[in-house]
Structures are given as structure tokens and as C-alpha cells.
Image: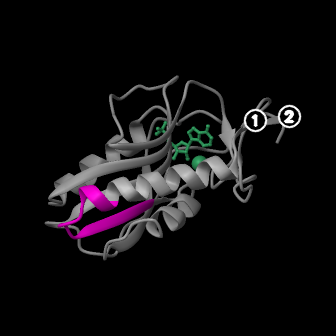
Amino acid sequence: MKKIVLSRQEIVKRVRELGQMITRDFAHDDLLLIGVLNGAFIFTADLAREIGLPIEIDFIRVASYGSGTSSSGTVTFTKDVERPVAGKKIMLVEDIIDTGRTIARLQQHFLRLGAASVHICALIDKKERREVEVHPDYAGFVVAEGFLVGYGLDFAEQYRNLPDVYHLENPTQP
Ligand code: IMP
Ligand code: MG
């Protein structure tokens, strides 16, 4: 069973607002957007088109989940970025922040590589299971709890293509 929590219309509106904020805040900077694959592939594509600045776009891929619904605790890099990051202002684009481990690890990674700054833009900030204190600089929606799918978010690689975001009520039966 799944229940809609964010409609495609709400998402379009909010992504536009996030793009406008980023456009305003980084007007004089060279910004490198780094989308976190696979979950953020749709959000990154939509957000990038709402940013009215000459930006670069790259992707990194990390795995922190098996096919279940809770974090394995370790974050493995399975594809690194290809653009140079030293001295760059980076915007990490993530689908959802849950425990906070993935995004905290990525922020630390790019700061170590000499990025000038590493900001975070998350479509969804989910508070329920936070273990590492991270606060996204830009958050589309704040949700208290639950397992969400759609608009890039998956359960066992299913549902990423749904245009709206749903709460999956029984995640053991996709
Ligand atoms: P964290 O490291 O626990 O913050 O987990 C972040 C990653 O877990 C995200 O990039 C998602 O891929 C995945 N994740 C966390 N919560 C959800 C959810 O509700 N639905 C789908 N994926 C999720
Ligand atoms: Mg995922």
C-alpha cells in the first residue's frame, strides 16, 4: 500500500523556489552541482534547470543500503566525480537525508579534497532516524518519518520513475 505525500505539482513549485534561492545565493560564484546517484538523478535534473547561473554538473554514486529500508551504517563510493573539485564551491544534491551518514561523509570527502565550500541541497529532510548532526542548507520538504518512494527514491530499485512521492506503508512487500 502506498499513499501520496508530495504531489508532482508541489514538487515542481518547491524545486523552482530552491533553484531561485540558489541562483540568488551563488550569483557571483562558480558552482559545481554534484548529484548523489541513484536517488537524486531526477531532482538534480529538475533543480539544475531552475538555476539561472553558468554551473557545472557532475555525479557521485554511493551505496549505503542493501535492498532493505535501513542504513547499513557504512558508506561505499561506487563512482567518483570527474570534475576537479579543489577550490570549487560545491552543492551536494541529495534525494533524502535519513540518518545523515551519507551526506556527512560526502561533505567531509569534498572538504578534504580542497573544495572551497560544500553546501547541501536535499529534496527531503527526514528527521526520524538522524544519527549524525547535519542540517541541509536547502531542504525541499521536511518529513517526520516513514519510508518514501517516487521521484527518484526507491525501494529495492523499484518506484524511482513515479512522478509523485509516496509513503510506502509496508516496505517488506514491494
Ligand atoms: P542516510 O545515510 O541514512 O542519511 O541515508 C541516505 C540514503 O538512504 C538516501 O540517499 C536514500 O538513498 C536512502 N533513503 C533514506 N530514506 C529513504 C526513504 O524513505 N526512501 C528511499 N530511500 C531512502
Ligand atoms: Mg536509495
Q: Who's the residue at 75% across and 35% down the image? A: 168
Magenta-colored span: 23-35
Query: Is residue 28 shown above or below 75?
Result: below
| Residue 29 located within the stretch drawn in magenta | yes
Q: Residues within 10 Å of mark 2 (few under 14, many from 20)?
A: few
Residue 23 coordinates in the image, percent (x, y): 32, 62
Q: Who's the residue at 56% across and 52% down the image? A: 13
Query: Is residue 110 shown above or below 32?
Result: above
Name the amino acid type tagged 1: Leu
Residue 170 coordinates in the image, percent (x, y): 80, 30
Q: Who's the residue at 53% across and 57% down the image? A: 40
Q: Nearer the viewer, residue 148 or 142?
A: 142
| Residue 24 located within the stretch drawn in magenta | yes
Mark 2 element type: loop
Left or right: residue 44 compared with residue 81? right
- Label 2 belongs to which residue? 1
In the image, is the residue at mark 1 within 8 Å of ligand 1 by its beta carbon? yes
The span from disc 1 to disc 2 (Cα, nearest Å) is 6 Å
How many discs mark residues in the rendered view? 2
Left or right: residue 85 compared with residue 20? left
The tag earlier along the polypeptide, 1 or 2, is 2
Q: Which mark is residue 35?
A: none
Quarter of the image containing the C terminus?
top right
Q: Nearer the viewer, residue 108 or 87?
A: 87
Mark 1 element type: strand
Residue 53 coordinates in the image, percent (x, y): 32, 72
Residue 108 coordinates in the image, percent (x, y): 25, 47
- Label 1 belongs to which residue? 168
Q: Are marks 1 and 2 in contact (CB under 8 Å)?
A: yes
Left or right: residue 5 compared with residue 54? right
